[in-house]
Image: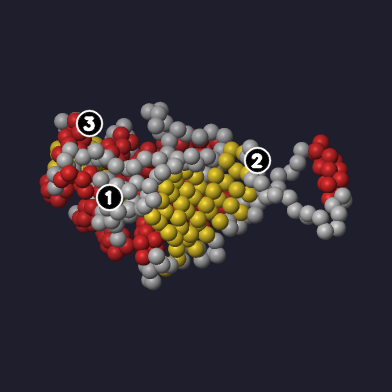
Amino acid sequence: MNESVNRRDFLKTFSLIAGSSVIIGSMPWLQGLNAQENSDKTVRIGMIGMGSRGMYLYLMLKDIPNMEIKCVCDDYEPHLANALEAVGPQAKGYVDYRQMLEKEQLDAVVIATPLHKHVGPTIDSMNAGLHVFCEKSMARTIEDCNEMVKAHQNTGKILYVGHQRMFNIKYHQAYKMIKEGKLGDITQIRAYWHRNNDWRRPVPSPDFERKINWRMYHEYSCGLMTELASHHIQVANQIYDQYPEYVWGSGSINHWKDGREVYDNVNLVYKYPNNSHLVYDSLISNKQYGLEVQVQGPKGTMELELGKMWEEFPPPAPGMLSLINHLEHKLFDAIPVGGASWVPDDAVSRKGNWIIDEVLDNDGTKMQMEAFVSDVRNNRVDSYITQQGFYSSVATLMGFNAMHRNEIVYWPEGLAM
C-alpha cells in the first residue's frame, strides 16, 4: 500500500467511475469513508494478537489521523516484544487481554489472535463497552459465531469482521455492474485459491508447535476454509444476496504429509436458494492459477481479482459482419447429411475489458481500517458488515463439516441475523 493512497483517493476514483455518492448510497457500509463529523476526536485502540496479521493491521492503522494505539496484547513473548518495539514507548504491553480491558481507557479493540481465540476477547470487549474489529473467520464453531452476534446485538457495539473485499474498488465496481444486469442472472460463481507452500512456520522448540502452527490442527483451525475460502464465500453471499442452503464436498491431505490435521486441498459446491451455485477449490501444492472469483451469467463473465469482463456475444466490428456471414454460409452449407454438426467448445480467447480504468494499489484492508476508525469515532453501527462476516463464517464452517463428516451439511435451522 502506497502511503499516498488514502480514502480521498478511494472516493476520488469512485467519483470518476460512477459518482461516490451513488455507490456509497447503495453500499452503506462505506459511509465511514465519507464521514467528516467529529474528525478531531481521537480514537483510542487496543490491539489483541500481534503475530503477522496483527502487525499488518497495525501498519494499516498507524497513519490514520487522530487515532492512537494505546496498548498491545499477546501471550507469546516474541510477538509482544516485536509489537512494542514497532508501536513505541507510548503503548503499554499486556499478556492477558482481560487485564488490558480492565486497566485501559479505550474506545475499540482490534483482534487478530488465532481463530479459536476470537470469541473470548470479542464478547468480553463488547460487554466492556468497546467497539470491535475481529479478523475473519469469526470463530472456530458455529455456536461461538452465534454468541458473538448476540453480544453485538445486546450491546449495540460495532462488530467488524475482516473481509477486506467489501472495501476493494474492483469488487465494488463489479457489484454495481452485476446489479445493472451486465451479466444477466448470475447462474454460477467459481472461485479458487491456490498456493504452493507447506504453511509451516519454524518453532523454537517442540513445545511451541501447536501454539505457532495452530493453523495445522482441528482444535484451533479449519485450515484452507477459515484462512482462505471465507473471503470468497463472503463475496458469493454478497453477489447472490443470500446465504447457501447446503454444501457438499471432499477434502484430503495428499501432499503435505507432515502430521497436520487440516486438509491441504479442498473441493466444495454450495447450493443457494436461487438454484445457483458457488463451486470452490483450494490447494497448497500448486500455484499456477493463483486466486480468482469468476462470476458467470448468460451475458458474460467477470473475474473480480483480475478486474476484467468478457461478453458472451460481443458485437463484431462493422467491417467484419459481411465476412462472418459469408464464412458461416460456406461452412454450414457444405456439411453433408450425417456429418459432424458441432465444433469443439474451446475456451474464449478474447482479451476482455477492464471493469474499471483506474485501480488503487490496495486490497481493501487500509480502507476497511479507515472506515472502522471513523465509525468508532461517530458511534455508527452498521450490522451489515457483521451479517456478512457471520454468514460467511457459518458457511465456511459448514463446508469444513461437510468434508470432515463426508455428508451434505445444511444451513442451521433458525440461524440468521
Mark 1 element type: loop
Mark 1 or mark 3, whichever is nearer to me = 1
- Residue 192 visible in image: yes
Please name whichever residue, 253 or 212, is drawn nearer the observer in this view of the structure. 253
In whole angstroms, how far apart are the C-alphas of marks 3 and 2? 48 Å
Please name whichever residue, 113 or 247, is drawn nearer the observer in this view of the structure. 247
Residue designated by label 2: 349
Q: Are marks 1 and 3 in contact (CB under 8 Å)?
A: no
Q: Are marks 3 and 2 in contact (CB under 8 Å)?
A: no
Please name whichever residue, 49 or 2, is drawn nearer the observer in this view of the structure. 49
At horizontal 24% and vertical 38% (from top left) the residue drawn is 202
Mark 2 element type: loop
Residue at the bottom extreme? 413
- Amino acid, disc 1: Gly
Q: Which mark is residue 86?
A: 3
Q: What is the x, y in percent for residue 121?
A: 21, 52
At horizontal 59% and vertical 38% (from top left) the residue drawn is 354
Q: What is the x, y in percent for residue 92?
A: 14, 37
Q: What is the x, y in percent for residue 34?
A: 42, 41
Residue designated by label 1: 259
At horizontal 33% and vertical 36% (from top left) the residue drawn is 60
Indicate whether 119 appears above or below 302: below
Q: Is residue 80 left or right of residue 289?
A: left
- Quadrant, the C terminus: bottom left
Q: Residues within 10 Å of mark 1 (few under 14, many from 20)?
A: few
In whole angstroms, how far apart are the C-alphas of marks 1 and 3? 34 Å
Give the mark nearer the N terminus: 1 vs 3: 3
Please name whichever residue, 397 or 200, is drawn nearer the observer in this view of the structure. 200
Q: Residues within 10 Å of mark 3 (few under 14, many from 20)?
A: few
Mark 3 element type: helix
Q: Are marks 2 and 1 in contact (CB under 8 Å)?
A: no
State which quadrant residue 88 falls in: top left
